[in-house]
Structure formats: structure tokens, C-alpha cells
Image: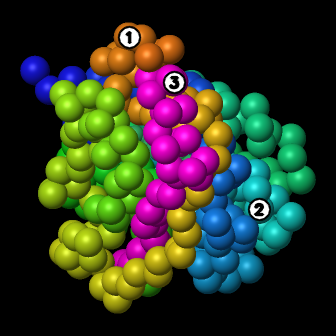
């Protein structure tokens, strides 16, 4: 049996995002070792070209970092609903953001069944979450339904080569785990997202965020690897930690990792 779950495997997704711990281990590595100092989350916010007054729905928000890190520049008249299918994530978002300067609404929502009437929103955002959804065409129909005519859909995702070196590293540790970084060709990726979105939306465009990782410490790299699809397959944490330390030393103390992320904008 392949020990690596598919990114859209329901059981994997429910367990992986029970709370924010796994996601935070990955975010930590990006925060500490990314070569682009601007920061992905600030960059995503820069790309939202919205009027001073609008209704926004975020799907799969996780702990709500998009809003937390941009609190200082959210226009007062934006009505923002933050949602996630994981009750643990929705709780975390509420904990981080309730009572802040901007009044947010929090909901538990599966993107495949959005509980709002048609044309309820000016904007829908799905940040690094569509590759986790088994029935993406249903999600696109739902987003199309709840967006007003002319409304904007923003969807971020990764490319095929994103963190490729980490998959290769895991494969050297254990060839059975070589598919760690594998993404199904029919997933939602930078390479195929435009054709998927164009079936329901118009004026689809993509902007990429230039970045990479230069990792100089083993421990956060091990936390990252174990936060993903091998957490149950690797029983011996010490063994993988020693392996990563050796690999890092062999690379002269700096491990270079490709990053490939971007944001689609589409019009309803
Ligand atoms: C990789 S995390 C991204 C979190 C956040 N958007 C970010 O970029 O930091 C994916 C999130 O999507 C959520 N998710 C997965 N499947 C979902 C679905 N069908 N509907 C809504 N949220 C979902 C997960 O619970 C998780 O919080």
C-alpha cells in the first residue's frame, strides 16, 4: 500500500487539519528560511484589487493568517466571512481574530456546499485549499452561484516543482516514501488551474510569487517533513532527524529548496 495519502483524501484532510499544528510547522519553515523578505501573505493581500466597500467570503481559511497579518490595512467597510470545514481551524481563526479592530464573521463551511443564497458576495478567496477538495467542479459551481455578476474569485496554489527537493530528500531516506511530494495531475496546480477555472469563470489570470528556501537548520526541516503526508509512515523520528542533519552537513550547511506559488484571479 502507498503510505502517502492523496492530497484530497478525506480522512487525511480531516486528520491533517484537526487543528493548526501541522500547518504551523510548515508556515514556520517558510517564515524563517524564505529568500523573498516581502512575505507571501502580504503579497496575496496586495493582489486583491477591491473597492472600499464589499462582501468577502474566504473558504479554507485555516487559522485566518491572511487577515491577521494584514489587519493594519483592511478597509473598514469590507464585510469579511472567514470559514473552514475543520471546526478546529475555525476555532483557531476565531481565537486569533475575534475582538480585533475589524469585525469578522466565522463559519464552519465545506466549500462543496456553501450555505448562502446566490449572489451574496463580491469576492471569494480560496488560499492554498482547492487541491484538498475531492469535488472541485462542485466547488466552482458553488462559488459561481454565491458570487455577484462581475464578482472576483481569487485562488492560490502551488506548482508541480514546489518543494521538489524535499520529496527527493524523503525518497533518499526511504524509497517507499519517494512519492511524498506527489501531486495528482488532475489536482489544482499553477500549471492546470487556468483551464479548470475557465470552465466557469472569465478573464482568468495568474500572478506568481518569486521565492525559494535556503534552510540552515535541521529541526524545523524535520518538523516540516513530519507535518505532512508521512507522519504515520515514519515511526522513528530520531532516525529521520539524524538523516536530515547528515544531508544538511553534506550540502555545506544550507539546503536549497524550490518554491512555486501563485494566485489566480477570475471573474464571474
Ligand atoms: C493548506 S491549508 C490553508 C489554510 C490557509 N488558507 C492558508 O493559506 O494558510 C488548507 C485548509 O483548507 C481546509 N479545507 C480542506 N478541505 C476543505 C473543504 N472541502 N472546505 C473548506 N475548507 C477545507 C483545511 O481544513 C485547511 O484549513
The magenta stretch is: 240-268
On screen, residue 263 above or below 150: above
Residue 25 percent across, percent down from the top left? 59, 35
Residue at position x 54%, y 32% in the image: 245
Does residue 245 show up magenta in the picture? Answer: yes
Q: Nearer the viewer, mark 1 or mark 3?
A: 3
Residue 147 shows in this picture? yes
Residue 23 shows in this picture? no
Mark 3 falls on what kind of element?
helix
Furthest residue toward top: 235
| Marked residue nearer the N-terminal end (2 or 1) | 2
Location of the C terminus (image quadrant): bottom left
Q: Which residue is mark 2?
A: 70
Mark 1 falls on what kind of element?
loop
Mark 2 falls on what kind of element?
loop
Q: Nearer the viewer, mark 3 or mark 2?
A: 3
Residue at position x 72%, y 68% in the image: 37
Q: Which residue is mark 3?
A: 241
- Measure the alpha-carbon separation of dots 2 and 1: 39 Å
Q: In which image quadrant can residue 180 be found?
A: top left
Residue at position x 59%, y 35% in the image: 218
Residue 235 relative to residue 237: left or right: left
Q: In which image quadrant can residue 204 be found?
A: bottom left
Q: Which residue is mark 1?
A: 235
Amino acid at each position: 500500500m502507498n503510505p502517502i495519502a492523496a492530497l484530497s483524501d478525506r480522512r487525511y484532510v480531516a486528520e491533517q487539519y484537526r487543528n493548526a499544528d501541522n500547518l504551523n510547522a510548515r508556515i514556520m519553515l517558510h517564515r524563517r528560511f524564505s529568500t523573498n523578505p516581502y512575505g507571501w501573505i502580504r503579497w496575496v493581500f496586495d493582489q486583491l484589487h477591491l473597492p472600499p466597500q464589499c462582501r468577502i467570503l474566504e473558504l479554507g481559511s485555516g487559522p485566518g493568517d491572511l487577515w491577521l497579518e494584514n489587519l493594519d490595512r483592511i478597509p473598514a467597510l469590507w464585510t469579511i466571512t472567514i470559514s473552514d470545514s475543520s471546526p478546529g481551524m475555525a476555532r483557531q481563526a476565531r481565537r486569533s481574530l475575534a475582538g480585533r479592530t475589524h469585525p469578522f464573521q466565522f463559519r464552519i463551511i465545506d466549500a462543496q456546499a456553501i450555505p448562502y443564497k446566490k449572489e451574496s458576495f463580491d469576492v471569494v478567496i480560496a488560499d492554498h485549499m482547492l487541491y484538498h477538495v475531492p469535488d472541485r467542479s462542485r466547488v466552482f459551481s458553488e462559488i459561481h452561484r454565491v458570487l455577484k455578476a462581475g464578482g472576483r474569485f481569487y485562488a492560490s496554489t502551488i506548482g508541480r516543482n514546489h518543494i521538489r527537493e524535499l520529496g527527493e530528500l524523503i525518497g533518499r531516506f526511504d524509497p517507499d516514501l519517494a512519492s511524498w511530494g506527489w501531486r495528482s495531475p488532475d489536482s489544482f496546480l499553477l500549471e492546470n488551474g487556468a483551464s479548470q477555472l475557465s470552465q466557469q469563470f472569465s478573464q482568468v489570470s495568474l500572478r506568481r510569487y518569486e521565492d525559494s528556501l535556503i534552510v540552515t537548520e535541521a529541526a524545523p526541516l524535520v518538523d516540516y517533513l513530519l507535518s505532512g503526508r508521512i507522519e504515520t509512515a515514519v515511526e522513528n523520528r530520531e532516525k529521520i532527524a539524524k538523516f536530515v542533519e547528515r544531508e544538511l552537513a553534506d550540502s555545506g550547511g544550507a539546503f536549497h529548496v524550490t518554491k512555486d506559488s501563485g494566485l489566480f484571479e477570475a471573474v464571474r
